[in-house]
Amino acid sequence: MVQLEELYEELLGRLPTEPETNLTLSAANCARPPDEVETQNLKVLAWRLGHDYGDCARYDVVEFFADTASYQRFGLLLFASVFHPNRQVTLHLRHAEATVKKIRIECGIADAASPHLSGLATVPVAYGYSPSPIGHIHGVVAGKSFW
């Protein structure tokens, strides 16, 4: 099975790191991912009870833990899956503490030749990536909570 750490090595080295720089990601530079990938460097934990919003809704919640390079490789795997659609990629999570063991990635695109197509069919062709500093996470900016 292919290791996530072995994928997109050349592209990873070309990702911009400074604000005001960019790289356009597309099918041309994001190679088609293999069907099965694994990593030990991404820990995903599921909250058993999820998160409740009042009395009306409960949502699943997962937490991701990884180093920067692993997050970047995971992001490139996601983009590659978007740019090479209509297939399934399974990422096997081998971290000893992970409670989520697999992530299945699918990006389905409507068949424009289908006689049953209704509405606009779009196809993702490119994404302009440019790094920027993190502004806030869940209502926290520079250590100050909005809650």
Image: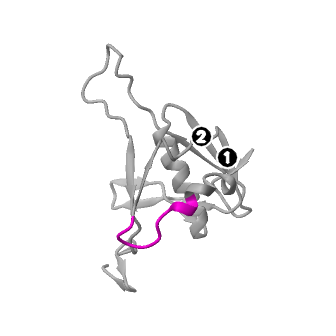
Q: Position of residue 41 (x, y in %)?
A: 67, 63
Residue 92 on the magenta segment: no
Q: Which residue is mark 1?
A: 37
Viewer-nearest residue: 127 or 133: 127
Which amino acid does the dot numbered 2 rest on?
Val
Q: Which quadrant of the structure image shows residue 44?
A: bottom right
In the displayed structure, would residue 147 be above or below residue 122? below
Disc 1 from disc 2: Cα separation:
8 Å
In the displayed structure, would residue 69 be above or below residue 76? below
Question: Which residue occupies 24% across, 27% down?
Answer: 119
Q: Position of residue 45 (x, y in %)?
A: 60, 61
- Name the residue at the left extreme: 119
Residue 18 on the magenta segment: yes
Question: Which residue occupies 60% across, 56% down?
Answer: 10
Q: Which residue is mark 2?
A: 89
Count of numbered circles on the image = 2
| Cβ–Cβ under 8 Å for marks 1 and 2 | yes
- Name the residue at the top extreme: 115
- Whether residue 85 is visible to the viewer of this picture, yes or no, is yes
Viewer-nearest residue: 42 or 111: 111
Q: Position of residue 88 (x, y in %)?
A: 57, 36
Write down the region rendered in magenta: 12-21
Which type of secondary structure does the marked residue at label 1 adopt? strand
Question: Which residue occupies 48% across, 41% down?
Answer: 27
Q: Quick one: quadrant of the C terminus?
A: bottom left
Mark 2 surroundings: few (<14), some (14-19) or many (≥20) residues within 10 A: some
Which amino acid does the dot numbered 1 rest on?
Val
Q: Which quadrant of the structure image shows residue 137?
A: bottom left
Which type of secondary structure does the marked residue at label 2 adopt? strand
